[in-house]
Image (cartoon, grey):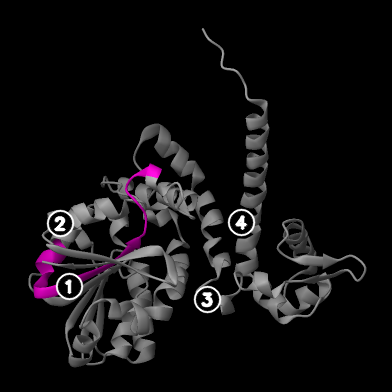
Amino acid sequence: MKTATLDQARAEAFAEKMLSVLNDGALALMTSIGHRTGLFDTLATLPPATSAQIARAAGLHERYVREWLGAMVTGRIIEYDSTTDTYVLPAEHAASLTRAATPNNLAMQAQYIPLLGAVEDGIVRSFRHGGGVPYAAYPRFQQVMAEESEQTVAAALIDTILPIVPGVVTALRTGIDVLDVGCGRGHTINLMAQAFPQSRFTGYDFSEDGVAAGRTEAKEWGLVNVRFAVKDAATLDEVDQYDLVTAFDAIHDQAQPREVLRRIALALRKHGTFFMQDIAASSHVHKNLTHPLAPFLYTISCMHCMTVSLALHGEGLGAVWGEEKARQLLTEAGFNTIEVKRLAHDVINNYYVAKK
């Protein structure tokens, strides 16, 4: 048997890469904590400060803050002055780490790493025995998704995203029937209902907690033109009922995406529009080699999107189903015209405008 010759330089370079993976993975955990505790937001408002001063300003325990700062300093995220024992978050770093930096707050995205790590045992079992990890195993996923949606969708929904569809803003102002499939916690559809009081809105999601959150928000806002229901989109049985159907980052999670798309097409009126936001990527892995977030997206797919579908004996489409596959499934569902558009503020998503 021929023994492969080891390229020592290549081996050493890869070992360095793996050290970076370990350090960056650890920093992702600490970045998530910095976001959730508000430490980045606090630091952005402070001059150079000691760990005690930072902890006091953030309302946190100093010993934990000090250890967290150790990771942030050695990770070159926060700067430290040993002569004064003070820490500072550079403005250039705060531009990617604070809530004020929305939609460019990448610290929010770091929450996915610990969230997905919590289901690793279930994923490993699924590798060995098949099946998947059910949606109920992710207690914070919908909350984090809602926060991401707030950054990428809600903040630009009315002025930037909806105008992608020709004539839709005018129609919404006049009054049309709108369905949001996989509405999650309902914030997006509530924003539309608030902005366009002459239109009528329906939100469906199979999560009871999500639907309850949408109803609560609608009541708090005094909305009377929106309704929510717990419903599996694959059982959608309305025909010619809607002028606009939206799906924000929801189709690739479905157990039966082909059936969902087919039923969406049936639910639309003759000149209606299906507006779908989904991951901007190729269906072919070699075409994603230069994608800036490809490893992150495949990881989320494997550890959530794909597995929750397989847990329901579904197709397991996955987050990186890609534009080619999306076009194929939309065509099979009965959509004859499909346009794909991108937005400058959103590097993660494609926006599909589909008509029958």
Quarter assignment of residue 73? bottom right
Q: Which residue is mark 4?
A: 28
Q: Which residue is mark 2?
A: 331
- Would residue 218 appear left or right of 12 to someone viewing this image? left
| Tag in front: 2 or 4 | 2
Residue at image coords 45%, 43%: 122
Number of the label disc, if any, that sits on residue 273: 1
Q: Residue 89's spot in the image, x, y percent?
A: 72, 71
In this view, the residue in front, 167 or 204, is 167
Q: Residue 14's spot in the image, x, y percent?
A: 62, 36
For label 3, the SS is: loop
> Rounded to the nearest whole Å, what is the CA distance between mark 2 and mark 3?
35 Å
Residue 255 shows in the view: no
User: Disc 3 vs disc 4: Cβ atoms closer than 8 Å?
Assistant: no
- Magenta stretch, residue numbers: 263-286
- Of mark 2 and mark 3, the one earlier in the sequence is 3
Residue type, mark 1 in image: Thr
Numbered marks: total: 4
- Would residue 173 appear left or right of 347 to someone viewing this image? left
For label 1, the SS is: strand
